[in-house]
């Protein structure tokens, strides 16, 4: 009986369900609908919301977002659940697990770039909830911090697993850089923040100077494919201050000039 239900009826029902609920329905009805189609037709995209506005800023479609998720290091289920909680304003101060799961084995340049892109989309989408709620212990601020912490841990794991020899404590030496991630609007730039992170490890002598050529080669591709058009002059000024008078200031200028939104 269920197999005779028209597809447009199923899609209409699915548009009112979360990704996981829609997936469960499709499996229960034994229907041949791809995960990508379920994702792009679930409740996340059935109404106007902050996520859809963010995708417009990026110039991408829900199908593009799905591919970014699949090709990132984040766990698909935890990503979709977190988007659902943010978009439909379910984040609260009650003891709930809003953590996002990441696969630390996925460290290829493609995985890193997609993970950074997805992190930026999260942070942009959540900003309205932070700005519009001038309250103590804003739960969205906590989620914002959690997302950035996960990204920082991911960067550290990549560095340690890539064979770079550390000569300083990475937590202490990157304190200023980590602070930049928490306090600046880096997510509005088209910069590959991981590549800049590597350059900062050189600048602070956290890794051996022997890796300079390798890091420079990586930094030659520091601009990500992004349609974001924000100037972020304050962000760039903060970075310049961190590298001012250092050994790698000229390379930093090259990176900044790569980014079309640097004015």
Image (tube, rainbow, N blue to C red):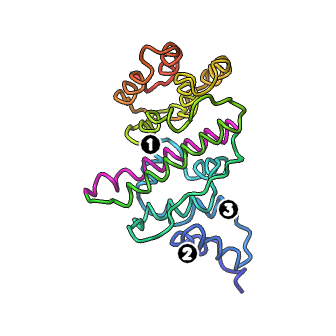
Give me the C-alpha separation between circle 2 and circle 3: 16 Å
Q: Can you identify the residue that label 3 sits on?
A: 35
Q: Is residue 117 above or below residue 231?
A: below
Q: Give the class, few, some or many, for how many residues have Cα within 10 Å of label 2's Cα (few <14, many ≥20).
A: some
Residue 137 image-quadrant placement = bottom left
Give me the C-alpha separation between circle 3 and circle 1: 25 Å
Q: Give the class, few, some or many, for how many residues have Cα within 10 Å of label 3's Cα (few <14, many ≥20).
A: some
Asked whether 3 or 120 is in front, the reply is: 120
Secondary element type, mark 1? helix
224 falls in the magenta region: no
Asked whether 162 or 144 is in front, the reply is: 162
* Mark 2 / mark 1, whichever is N-terminal: 2
Q: Residue furthest left?
A: 134
Q: Give the range drawn in magenta.
A: 108-134
Give me the C-alpha separation between circle 2 and circle 1: 28 Å
Q: Where is residue 251 in the image (x, y as percent from the top left)?
A: 53, 16
Q: In this view, does 7 lie above or below 56?
A: below
Depth-wise, is mark 2 or mark 3 nearer the camera? 3
Q: Which quadrant: the N terminus?
A: bottom right
Q: Name the mark on residue 13.
A: 2
Q: Can you identify the residue that label 1 sits on?
A: 57
Q: In this view, does 95 lie above or below 149?
A: below
37 to the left or right of 143: right
Q: Position of residue 248 (x, y in %)?
A: 52, 16
Q: Position of residue 258 (x, y in %)?
A: 52, 21
- Taking the spot 49% from the left edge, 47% from the top edge, the residue there is 148
* Mark 2 / mark 3, whichever is N-terminal: 2
6 to the left or right of 42: right
131 falls in the magenta region: yes
């Amino acid at each position: 009986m269920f197999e005779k239900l028209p597809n447009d009826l199923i899609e209409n029902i699915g548009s009112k369900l979360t990704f996981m609920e829609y997936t469960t329905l499709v499996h229960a009805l034994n229907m041949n609908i791809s995960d990508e189609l379920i994702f792009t037709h679930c409740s996340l995209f059935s109404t106007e919301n902050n996520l859809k506005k963010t995708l417009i800023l990026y110039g991408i479609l829900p199908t593009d977002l799905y591919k970014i998720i699949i090709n990132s290091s984040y766990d698909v289920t935890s990503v979709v659940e977190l988007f659902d909680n943010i978009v439909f304003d379910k984040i609260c101060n009650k003891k709930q697990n809003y953590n996002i799961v990441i696969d630390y084995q996925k460290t290829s340049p493609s995985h890193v770039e997609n993970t950074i892109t997805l992190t930026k989309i999260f942070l942009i989408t959540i900003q309205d909830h932070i700005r519009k709620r001038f309250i103590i212990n804003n739960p969205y601020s906590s989620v914002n911090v959690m997302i950035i912490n996960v990204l920082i841990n991911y960067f550290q794991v990549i560095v340690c697993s890539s064979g770079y020899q550390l000569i300083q404590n990475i937590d202490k030496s990157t304190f200023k850089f980590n602070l930049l991630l928490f306090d600046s609007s880096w997510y509005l730039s088209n910069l590959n923040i991981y590549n800049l992170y590597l350059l900062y490890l050189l600048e602070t002598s956290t890794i051996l100077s022997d890796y300079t050529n390798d890091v420079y080669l990586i930094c030659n591709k520091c601009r990500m494919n992004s349609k974001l058009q924000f100037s972020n002059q304050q962000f760039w000024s903060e970075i310049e201050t961190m590298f001012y008078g250092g050994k790698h200031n000229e390379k930093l200028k090259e990176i900044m000039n790569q980014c079309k939104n640097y004015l």
